[in-house]
Image (cartoon, rainbow, N blue to C red):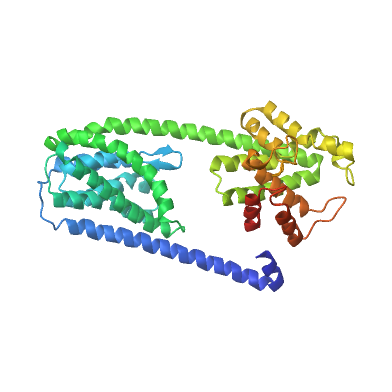
Amino acid sequence: MTEAIAATGPRTTDDAVLQLQRESESQHLTRTAVTGLLATGFVVVAFGALLLPSHRSFSLVALLSALVAYAIASRVEVEFPGFAAIPTEAIFVVMWFVLPLQALPLAVVGAMLLGRLPDVIRGRMPADRLALVVGSCWHSVGPALLLYFVGSRAPHWSDVPYYAAALAAQFAFDFASTYAQTRSIVPISPRALLESTALVWSFDLVLAPLGLLAAFPAYRDPAALLLLMPMVLIVARVGREREEKNDKVLELKEAYQGTTYLLGDMIESDDAYTGSHSRDVVELVLAVADRLGLDADAQRMAEFTALLHDVGKLRIPTEVINKPGPLDDAERELMNTHTILGQEMLERAGGLLGEVGPYVRSCHEHWDGNGYPDRLAGESIPLVARVVCTCDAWSAMTTDRSYRKALSLEAAKEELRRCAGTQFDPQVVDALLAVL
């Protein structure tokens, strides 16, 4: 893209910006349209359901108890690795038995809007975002339809298969509406979305039996639904503690990242090439790590390793580091100790930096076993180190040095391909070539 812009001039740049703006506006319109359709469709279904004959008498106590309990629970969020959940499921299951089933979707959306009302009043949520809230209530339609046609009756253990089917219907409607909304924002496959939503469903599966137990007394006295509130308060407490813990972990990671960049600045002050080179390698490493599908923790480790892979050079004499020409054998042998020195420095620092040490040590190992310092080969070399090694070599080949000029991009790519399977992991080379 850079070459095309340079060749065709500023007008192409302006056109590209306008094209990106048009695509962004188009995506926004699509997202808004999908959200509006989901919300409108739900409202039509929810109010249309009220026209069905009622199998159960209406109870104001049941409605008020359900609205209050569900609204409060909807404001509680518990963070887990990869997802966040709200503890509404137990209350929702009780609502299957204390409210007329044709009114269930409308009660759920009313409770959700009631739960968001404080945020709207305080200006924390724009009013137009409420359409998202309405569109997220499609999950309530599945159980309402299934149980309505099964027939409203008191909770009974013999009907557990029906309740399991109702839960499956809830997940099916939830998945369909979530996929429509998410697909309007990002290109995601049904399988990928299923993997992420399954985590949320697992939380609901844990709470659903609790709701069924509470349904037995609530069927006779709807106010008994409020007995679930201590559970909601406990979950809220756990949620706050997890949030505080996650915040502290994030602060610690940021502190480690700050320390890492400080060390990078020290390298740069001692050797301008090594410092700027390390920053360039970081960008390449993160792109390749993402291409290879490394998880968040591995990507963070790769980032730190890329920035600190040359930290051991701080303990190599400056005259060797900045020698204006090739190193002799003794100097090369000394230079090759910098990965070991880097590991020692980082392990003395301890904590997360200590965990980076072994990766730094292995950043000059070769796929065929002819690297240093331990002559590791193949997959015995940590993947993070293999990624940094390849990106490090690319950056070195495409950068001017005191004793040689940088290779052209095509020549450097050809060198990568030539050394795939000997110096570099072929899979990492393919990923690097794909992201360049």
Quadrant housing residue 298: top right
Between 275 and 361, the one lying in front of the other is 361
Q: What percent of the width, then of the height, locates residue 433? A: 65, 57
* Left or right placement of residue 109 versus residue 393 in this view: left
Tell me what residue is drawn at x 45 percent, y 62 percent.
Answer: 28
Q: What percent of the width, then of the height, locates residue 24? A: 50, 63
Tell me what residue is drawn at x 62 percent, y 70 percent.
Answer: 14
Quadrant housing residue 328: top right
Asked whether residue 123 is in view, the answer is no
Asked whether residue 114 is in view, the answer is yes
Q: Is residue 104 above or below residue 311?
A: below
Quadrant housing residue 243: top left
Between 177 and 123, the one lying in front of the other is 177
Tell me what residue is drawn at x 37 percent, y 43 percent.
Answer: 200
Q: Which quadrant: the C terminus?
A: bottom right
Q: Is residue 294 above or below residue 353?
A: below
* Left or right placement of residue 38 versus residue 429 in this view: left
Q: Which quadrant: the N terminus?
A: bottom right
Q: Is residue 333 above or below residue 392?
A: above
Tell me what residue is drawn at x 86 percent, y 34 percent.
Answer: 317
Q: What percent of the width, then of the height, locates residue 75? A: 34, 41
Q: What percent of the width, then of the height, locates residue 217? A: 15, 33
* Left or right placement of residue 428 versus residue 342 in this view: left
